[in-house]
Amino acid sequence: MDTMLNPPLAGQVAVVAGGTRGAGRGIAVELGAAGATVYVTGRSTRHGRSPMNRPETIEGTAERVTAAGGKGIALRVDHSRSEDVAALADRVRRDHGRLDVLVNDVWGGDPLTEWDTPFWRLDVAKVQQLWQQAVVTHLLTSQHLVPLMLDHHRGLVVEITDGTGEDYRGSLGYDLVKTAVNRLAFAMAEELRPHGVTALAVTPGFLRSEAMLEIFGVTEANWRDGVRRDPHFAASETPHFVGRAVAALAADPAIAARAGLVHTSWDLGEEYGLTDVDGRRPHWGRHIAASAS
């Protein structure tokens, strides 16, 4: 099939919650490249920044979605506010009457994560806020938007996480919320299965996000220079790689078989024959295994 003439997600409607930057932006753009209409939501707009205080905006992502071949729609939504998410659901229902794909990628937890701090010294107030920001927002968003799928007995809910839950993630607060997101996908899958809706989780590998490029002092054009600082950077991936993995999942007619599981971008890349924007097929799992041997 010529995907340029017959994009696999043509006519489908998606919401990427937390689509401002990083994995969310990559996923939104790749859903657009597959032909979908994508609502890009978040708090960072050209009229004001979120507490993350970064330059990326939902409008910028929506424009990239459209440029990729889809239709990008930017809507400012604070996913911790029920009224904001309810308004988003009303907008999608009014515009389309249904929702095909929901991606929960709300994060905003970088300022709240205390790395290199043992749990007995953590600021519990920050952990509580992190829980609200990175887990409760996902549940709230699904509560309001999944009914748009139930009406049509089909749909896909994707929880974006970090790690499969098997290894410690470096900080108790961070580990707690990322593991909870994995379990959220599992629990939702159990309750959604009778309704024809699939829920699952997806983790990228070492993500070469906008922030990570800045931390390494490189750009996407010369990112390999970052290997001098950290050899593991050689196995990193752009946000488009996990984006292509999510788009492939959304187009998979056998998606129900994947319900409740945590899937990795690198395994999905191999299964679906995906490559990153530079033609590479990064495999974080294989890289880490080789590094440990």
Image: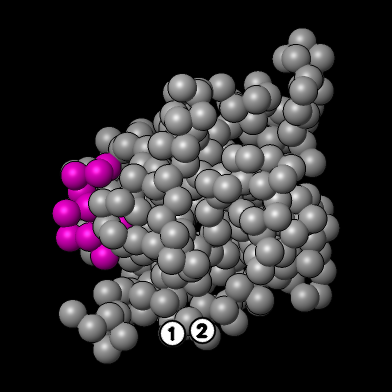
Circles 2, 1 touching at the beta carbon (< 8 Å): yes
Location of residue 111 with respect to 51 vertically, above or below: above
Amino acid type assigned to the residue bearing label 2 in the image = Thr
Q: Quadrant of residue 126?
A: top right
Residue 19, numbered circle: none
Q: Is residue 74 above or below residue 261?
A: below
Left or right: residue 136 compared with residue 228: left
Q: Nearer the viewer, residue 214 or 192?
A: 214
Which residue bears the numbered disc 2? 66
**Residue drawn at 56 percent across, 22 percent down:** 168
Q: Position of residue 115 (x, y in %)?
A: 75, 28
Q: Nearer the viewer, residue 34 or 212?
A: 212
Mark 2 → mark 1, Cα distance in angstroms:
5 Å
**77 w.r.t. 285: above or below:** below
The local crowd at label 1, few if under 14, some if 14 to 19, many if 20 or more residues have their Cα within 10 Å, is many
| Residue 58 x, y percent position in the rendering | 65, 70
x and y percentages locating residue 177 in the rendered image: 58, 32
Residue 235, magenta (yes or no)? no
Residue at image x 60%, y 40%? 232
Q: Is residue 266 visible?
A: yes
Find disc 1 in the rendering and name its residue: 69
Q: Residue at x 81, y 23 (%)?
A: 123
Q: Is residue 258 magenta?
A: yes
Left or right, residue 72 beside residue 122:
left
Most distant residue in the bottom direction: 5
Q: At 68% from the left edge and 64% from the top edge, which residue is drawn?
A: 222
Q: For the magenta stretch, what is the residue range?
A: 249-259
- Residue 30 position, x and y percent, is 44, 70
